[in-house]
Image (cartoon, rainbow, N blue to C red):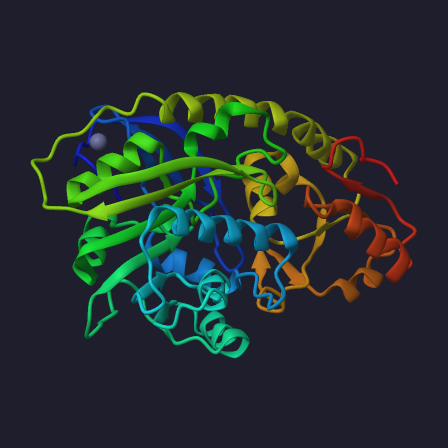
Amino acid sequence: MTIRPCEICSGIDLELLHRQHFLFPGLSSPVHYDAVTCRACGFSFASEIPDQSALNQFYQDSEHHLHAELPPGLKRIHADFFQFVREHTPLQADTRILDIGSGMGHFLGHFQNAGFNRLLGMEPSPAAAALARKIYGLEIRTATVDTFVADERFQLISLCGVLEHIADLHDSMAKIDALLRDDGYLFLAVPDAVSFGASPPAEAFLEFALEHINFFSVTSLDNLLSAVGFEKVAVISQHNDFYDNHYLLAMYRKVAKSGQSFRVDDEAADSLRRYVALSRQALRPVEELAAQLEESGEPILIWGAGSLTSRLLCDTRLGKANIRGIIDRNRNLQGKPLLGVGISAPESIVDHPGATIFIASTTYAAEIRNTLINQYGWTGRIVSIAPGATQT
Ligand SMILES: [Zn+2]
């Protein structure tokens, strides 16, 4: 765990905005990162990131949502991204295009549909890469920005939902720059940090997920890109219904590197401060519920061993409750301990007939409740943190 200097101005005078704790399966004690803002340029990011070994453990287990058939909301996001790229770049059918972090190939699939024929994906997850080859017949290399080599440079490189995860931003951008032709274009899509504090979050502190370590605004994105030698073509902030947040869609063009100068970002840190305050408010009823569960001492099964449970175990008194089991459908997690309690498959709830089930999900709480009652015939108490749904 080390202080991470600002990736834009190398500043180390950092203001702490929030310390986020994490606990995940297989890890004996919680880890944390600090959401900070650079006092020199205003770039906001996570410093004191957990060691790579802890992160590897996390990535190994958190099997990214591999679905061949995309939910409609996600499909629309990719269509919007594609539309934006078409509007702002002169592309021909034989334009050489590289999608970094291509996942299951859904974004490249739009190019393929439109008749583009020189497409390449780069994807670190072998499982996702295999799905992209199977669904679309795309050429995908299993690689990271560090290990990737190409014999020819590209006219367009895209990174959708990638830059917010990258720890060594400056070095990675330099490598990506070298893969682009001198007149090449760069398309980026990242969460818009300026929107985080705009309205109360459905789930407290969700934006401070372990894998989200850069919080970009239009200004800080511009600062990062101009330092590497890119000029802005267009940037928009677009609401995304599926995740209920805003994304920045940005197109940049490669130009000669100019002298390094930056504009101070005075928006992102303010937004994050509001976000922290709103998240604390949103957490209050959950804290009360957790305190009740601790006091009653009733046996509890937690449904869900994901990031929400991880945060609640650290941020509330839930970890002090009489937890008898943690349930998760993800087979990678089953058998692993979380806070000393084993994770098991949903079928194991029959071993705890008198327990209270705590549903750790906001989005899927109603669906899980239905499954419990209709599929598993559960007649015991069910509580959840979804607003207005704490009783059976
Ligand atoms: Zn800075």
Number of marks drawn: 0
In front here: 277 or 129?
Answer: 129
Residue 143 in the image: state x and y as whole percent.
32, 70
Find residue 242 and report its horizontal and vertical position in percent.
61, 45
Position of 237 with respect to 202 (left or right) is left
Quadrant of res 97:
bottom left
In the rendered view, tell whether residue 112 sits above or below residue 62.
Answer: below
Residue 96 percent coordinates (x, y): 29, 67
Relative to 29, residue 116 above or below = below
Which residue appears at 86% of the width and 44% of the height? 381
Q: Is residue 3 visible?
A: no
Q: Which of the 4 image quadrants contains residue 199?
A: top right
Front in this rendered view, residue 13 or 75: 75
Residue 367, x across and y down, in percent: 78, 51
Identify the residue at horizontal 56%, vertical 48% (top origin): 307
**Is the residue 376 above or below the residue 141 in the image?**
above
Front residue (pair 336, 99): 99
**Which image quadrant: the C terminus?**
top right
Q: Residue at x 50, y 67 (%)?
A: 113
Above-or-below relation of 54 to 244: below
Q: Quadrant of ligand 1?
A: top left
